[in-house]
Image (tube, rainbow, N blue to C red):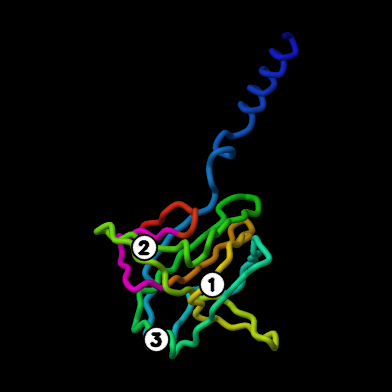
Amino acid sequence: MKNAVLQTGLTLLVLALVPFSGFCQDKTEMHAKIWNYKTICEFADPPNSREYDIKATSDKVTLEVTDCKTFEKKNPHPAAVSVSLKNGGATPAEIAIDKDLAGVEIVTKAKETVPAIAKRFLVEGPMGDKKMEYVTRIEASYVIKLNPGQSVNIVYFFQKAEAGDTVKVGTLKPIKIE
């Protein structure tokens, strides 16, 4: 009985000394905005959209890449939404993206669901060259690792989206588009 009281007292002391916000507050800052562009084939990616640490959570990863002309012909000027993730904490953060692309959608102000049709993604070619491509199908879940203060911008495409709509990316909390 005495040990249980001491154990409880020590636990309460530790909780009083350690900031409580560290236990329950997510330090990942998330924002979304419409990303304007001229044409699909002249797409200017936002900063911090190319180089970030990403790791698939399974061995099976399927990507379907579409060239800009084919994508633009099939989807004339779709809405581009830049989703920004920033590690606002003091330690590295791992952000799980579950069922990417299949798990990304817009919920319009009229409560209509609009699925993502593509995303911009840095793809490595067979000769080791890397370039941003339009990925129209992904069968994978992955983790993005962000160092303290690091941010990443991921661009998703939808048939329609506008400021005030909400974007859902996998199991992350929904984000209102600015």
At a point 33% along the width and 62% down the height, the residue shown is 113
Please tell me whether residue 159 belongs to the stretch shown in magenta.
yes
Specify the segment rendered in magenta.
157-168
Place of residue 152 in the rendered image (x, y in percent of width and height, measured from the top left): 54, 66
| Mark 3, residue position | 72
Residue 15 against residue 175 in the figure, above or below: above
Cα gap from disc 1 to disc 3, whole angstroms: 21 Å
Please tell me whether residue 93 belongs to the stretch shown in magenta.
no
Place of residue 155 in the rendered image (x, y in percent of width and height, measured from the top left): 46, 71
Q: Quadrant for residue 62, please give it.
A: bottom right
Q: Which mark is residue 49?
A: 1
Cα gap from disc 1 to disc 2, whole angstroms: 20 Å
Kind of residue sitting beneath label 1: Ser
**Pointer 1 local density, CA inside 10 Å: few below 14, some 14–19, many at least 20:** some
Point out the residue furthest to the top here. 1
Q: Quadrant for residue 72, please give it.
A: bottom left
Place of residue 84 in the rendered image (x, y in percent of width and height, measured from the top left): 48, 63
Place of residue 86 in the rendered image (x, y in percent of width and height, measured from the top left): 53, 58
Q: Earlier in the sequence, mark 1 or mark 2?
A: 1
**Pointer 2 local density, CA inside 10 Å: few below 14, some 14–19, many at least 20:** many
Point out the residue furthest to the bottom here. 69
Q: Earlier in the sequence, mark 1 or mark 3?
A: 1
Residue 22 against residue 124 in the figure, above or below: above
Disc 1 vs disc 2: which is toward the camera? 2
Residue 5 against residue 140 in the figure, above or below: above
Circles 1 and 2: CB atoms closer than 8 Å: no
